[in-house]
Image: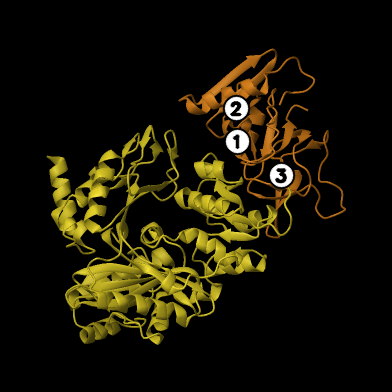
Amino acid sequence: MADLSPNQPRLFVANRGEIALRVIRAAHALGIETVLGVSAADRDSPAAREAGRAVVLGPAPSRDSYLNMDLVVHAAVATGCTLLHPGYGFLSERPDFAELCAAEGLTFIGPRAETVRAVGDKISAKAVADAAKVPLTPGSGKLLSVEHALEVAQGIGYPVITKASAGGGGRGMIVARDADELRRAFDQASTTAREAFGDDTLYLEAYVERARHLEVQLFGDGEGRVSHFGERDCSIQRRYQKMIEEAPASILTDDLRAGLRAAAVDLLASINYRNAGTVEFLYDEVRQKFYFMEVNARIQVEHPVSEQISSHDLIKLQLGLALGTATLPRQDDIALAGHAIEARILAEDPDRNFMPCPGRITRWVPATGPGVRVDSAVQEGSVVPPFYDSMVAKLIVTGADRAQAVARLSDALRRFKVEGIATNIPLLQAIVDHPDYRANAVSTKWLEDTLLPAFQTERSE
Amino acid sequence: MTDKGKSPALPSDDLQALVEQFNASHWRTLELEFHGSRLFLSKDAGTSPAWVGAAAATTVSSLPAARQLPAQTAAVPLPGAPVSGPIVAEGHVIVNAPSLGTFYRSPKPGAAAFTQIGEAVDADTELCLIEVMKLFTTLRAGVKGKVVKILVEDGVMVEYDQPLFVIDPNG
């Protein structure tokens, strides 16, 4: 690699797949050199080829490569990097990783370590939200015992849901509709939480029957100024994993929309938030109220839909803010227009209980056309390794309004051809063509409770 | 890429093409003899060609540090890494880096190197240190023999699985 002047920024990309490629391209467009840390399974990936340099951190398993902080930071320093982008997942929300970067002179592209710590634990995040007067779901603090849980549930009113203090991804979350169910749920959720997170601390919340997952995309300058890039509706989920996300949230009235965005801005402004972040809310469609869920202290998978309606490149903004070459856009300079939808293309077989389907992609014809964008890191001949997340691409469509975006998504899914591995494209097609989805009459349980049973019956006939 | 001092070996381009074809195939092992040079490729860790003695093969398979010409590392260059592609005939053993890190040939600055080309080593002879964030890991030879090549300069960053030493078990 050519020697560069010491003032030349060089970025270490500590991730893989589409987000690694997305970050590499954004950096190159800004004239920033890149080094990508890969596992042995990814040494021939498109991201490795496109990076200025790729270094093999360790063998395929994440814990020996992408999740090993010391290896990642050592590689970044030894290759002369000055900045590090953690992407999403892996080490992106580990406060000790952000601290290690800082200690080794690397600029961590994200919030300060203390911010990541303050919002990473769900109970402490709620305290932050509460202090910023952001509405919370009626619920409890740490539960001390099953008796304590029963007492709290009596006060809130059933149904209630258990949640793991240290966790996420749906683990430890069980709905209880009466005291008997809560006794069983408490034991089961404690065990799950202890096994998954090494911490069996639980708390309790009121359970919202018809819920929407809404979230606001934000950026902070680290000194108390925060701007939003609109909200997203991510209610199409399976087992708490998002599958389709859109922006804006068409379901909201103007008043509610303004209130949601303001609450998110206030929350992050109250902690002098730095760089990209998202505040997630649960929206109760019956009561027309939103409640704080959590802060994601990183860029998210679904950031492209916010880019599409705001005409801002959020990855370039992350890099520019970290380098000090960009300033945070003022709210008035962020014009939101149109409607964008993202569908996650997963290497999972919906006909076989979503079994992951790693393997070689023998045909790859991503959709093209007006308003169509595909973010991926695979191509014809690529091997989808069995070690990581199953997402192989994000199909993003944009239209003047929701109806046009939905029509474009349906067309694009029909034209998206993948062979060699099974994907969820047939399921995405069924979702997008369903009258409930077209009418925007869905909830976070709709995919599992309404669509999937019908889809599976139809496919087995 | 060629084994110096031997009769004409395979050109490196041919070797690379061979390894790529092997990797893409369903074959588990490949043995090739060419003008007195022999090449063995295997997708199964611990397997050895027929021409390696049983004792040596046991030693190799029981110690993950040293591997008998693994197919993945034989000739496919690591992206961006200055790999010299050590294709070794006659049962020579390559010792690869167990992880990414900084390669040190001596226990501390100014001290004598752990080993030199031509020196005899045992399975537990220390060859080098790999440092990751000030944590030093000793890499041992894993096989008895003679050091015939040292492929990396002292103090540089090496990547996971990068070939570092070549050892001749019959030397």
Percent from the top left, x then y, of residue A2?
71, 45
Front one among A107 and A196: A107
Question: Chain A is shown in which shade?
Answer: yellow
Percent from the top left, x then y, of residue A322?
58, 66
Q: Which amino acid does label 2 sit on?
A: Ser
Q: Can residue B155 be seen in this view?
A: yes
Q: Which amino acid does label 3 sit on?
A: Arg
Say which quarter of the image contains residue A440. Answer: bottom left
Q: Earlier along the polypeptide chain: callout 3 or callout 1? A: 1
Say which quarter of the image contains residue B4. Answer: top right
Q: Do the residues labelled 3 and 1 touch (CB within 8 Å)?
A: no
Q: Do labels 2 and 3 share a chain?
A: yes
Question: Is the N terminus of chain A in the top left, top right, bottom left or bottom right quadrant?
Answer: top right
Identify the element where label 1 is drawn.
Answer: helix
- Would you name the residue on which mark 2 appears? B48
Q: Earlier along the polypeptide chain: callout 1 or callout 2? A: 2
Q: Can residue A186 be seen in this view?
A: no
Residue occupying the point 70% across, 14% down: B36
- Would you name the residue on which mark 1 appears? B61
Please count the marks in the image.
3
Residue occupying the point 58% across, 23% down: B17
Q: Are marks 2 and 3 in contact (CB under 8 Å)?
A: no
- Would you name the residue on which mark 3 appears? B140
Identify the element where label 3 is drawn.
Answer: strand
Chain appearing in orange on the rendered image:
B
How many residues crowd around disc 3 within 10 Å: few (fewer than 14), some, or many (20 or more)? some
Please determine whether, in this image, residue B8 is positioned above or below residue A194: above
Q: Are marks 1 and 2 on the same chain?
A: yes
- Could you give the CA–CA distance between mark 3 and mark 1, rounded to whole angstroms? 14 Å
